[in-house]
Image (cartoon, helix red, strand yellow):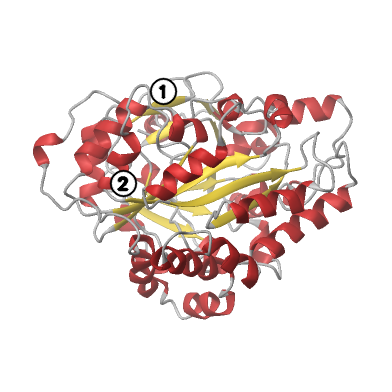
Amino acid sequence: MRVKFILPALTECTSPLFRPIKYSLFPPLGLATLAAYLSPEDEAEIADEHVSPLRTDDAPDLVAIEVYITSARRAYQIADSYRRRGVRVALGGLHVTSLAKEAATHADFIFTGPGEDTWPRFLADFRAGHPQPRYDSRVRTLAGVPPIRRDLIHRPLYLVPNSIVVTRGCPHVCDFCYKEAFFQGGRGFYTQRVDDALAEIERLPGRHLYFLDDHLLGDRRFAAALFEGMRGMGRVWQAAGTVNSILDARLEPRLLEKAVQCGLRSLFVGFETTDERNLTEQRKFQNLHRDYGEAIRRLHSLGVMINGSFVFGMDQDEASVFDRTVKWAIEQSIETATFHILTPYPGTPLYQRMEKQGRLLHRDWDLYDTRHTVFRPARMTPEQLEEGYWGAYRNFYRWSSIAEGAMQKETWPARARHFAYAAGWKKFEPLWDLVIRAKRIAQMRPVLERVLVGRSGPMPDQRNDLATRSTSDISLKVFSP
C-alpha cells in the first residue's frame, strides 16, 4: 500500500508578509508518527508544502492530510483534487475535530481528536476492505506507540529537525484554547513513559532539541524524571511552560534547576495579559495572582531566555494596552515576544460565547490566524485592534527596543546574547529568506546553538549519568489527526 501524508501550506504562506523561517522550523511530527503505524511492506511519503512544492498528479492508495484552520481551504482543494481522480482521502487535525461536518464533504474518512487509537483501527479496517467514514478518539493511552518515522523527514529543510513531543495536551482549561475541543471525550493531558521519551531523544542526532509540548512542565513528577534521565546527554533545548509552573516549588522544588542542568536555555511562557480581569474571563486561572516579574527573574537568573506570549483584544483591553504591554515586556528584558489577536476558534468556549453574543464578524477561516480581527472587540474598533497588534510588533522589535531590553541584563555576555537572539529572529528576514531558498537552513543550526548556550549560564551537564534514568510508568503525545 502506498500512503501519502500531506501538510498543506497555511494561508499566510502566500501573503507578501510571509516569513519563510517561521515555517522552516519544525517538520510535521504528527504525520511522521502516523506513518510509523504502517506495515514494513507499505510505502510512505511525507509532503510538507511549506518547504517544498506539492505534486498532486500522483495516485497513491491513500492520502492523509492534516488540517489547521488557516490551511483548511488549501487542504480541501488538495483533497478534492485527489478524490476526483479516485484516490481515497483521510482528513484529521484541529479543524476537522472542530468542524467535522464541513470536513466530511471533502473526505472519504475523517478523524476527530488525537489519532493514537483511531488511526491503527482505521488501517486495519482499510486493509480488510470495510473502513468507516468517521473515527472519533476515545481511548487516551500511548502504550505501544511505535518510534516516529523520522526517516521520512528531509532534515536539511528544517532549522529544528530535532523537534519532539513527550506529553499530550495541557492540564489547564483556557477559553480561547483549542484543547477542550480537540480532546473532548477523553483525557486532555497525558504523558509518555519516561523511558520511551528518553529513547526517542537518544535516537536524535546532533545536540539541539525543541520540545513542542503545550506544557512540558505540566506533570512535574514526569518532568523531573525526564530531566534526571537527560543529564549527561549534553543537549541544548527549548520548550514551553506556564507562569505557575515556574513559581510553584511545592512538588519539585528544584525542577527548573534540573531542566537547566540538562540543557534548557529558552522557554515559551504564556503571559497573555497583565490584567487579572482578563485572566478570570478567559479562565486562565493558573496565571491569577502570580508575580510575572518574579517568574522572569527566576528564569533569567538560571540563564534561560524567554519568548513571552501576549494576546490582545480581551474584553478589558483598551487602545492603550499595546504600548503598555510592549513597554512592560522591554522593561522586564524579555528576549522575544509573540503577539496575537484574540481569535475565537470553532469548538472553544470563547467561540461559543461570541457566537451567542452576536460578535463574530465572519467565518472566513483564512483570517482566523491571530493576525486579523474576526470579532467585535468590547473597548475598541476592529481596526484599532489590528493596528495596535502590528504596532506592538514594530515597537518591540525596533533596534532601540532590542538594545533597551538587552541593557537590562547585568552582564555584557548576557546583553549580547539577548541582542543576538532578538535581532536574529526578527531583523534579518532577507538573510533567512536567502538561506532557506538556497536550502542551507541546516547550516544555521550551530549559530542557534551558540546563541542559546551563550556565556551567561551554566553549560548542560555532560556526565554519562545513565543510572539516574527513570523507569516510571507514564504515557506520550503525538500530533493529530
Q: CA distance from mark 2 to mark 1?
A: 30 Å
Mark 2: which secondary structure?
A: helix
Location of residue 95 in the rendering, given as x and y in whole percent from the top left corner: 63, 39
Rendered position, 161 above or below 18: above
Front residue (pair 164, 293) = 293
List the residue tagged with mark 2: 260
Q: Residue at x 71, y 71 (%)?
A: 16
Q: Position of 78 compared to 190: left or right?
A: right
Q: In the rendered image, is residue 449 in sight?
A: yes
Q: Residue at x 76, y 60 (%)?
A: 391
Amino acid type, callout 1:
Arg
Front residue (pair 450, 438) = 450
Q: Locate residue 356: give its quadrant.
A: top right
List the residue tagged with mark 1: 140
Mark 1: which secondary structure?
A: loop
Rendered position, 468 above or below 330: above
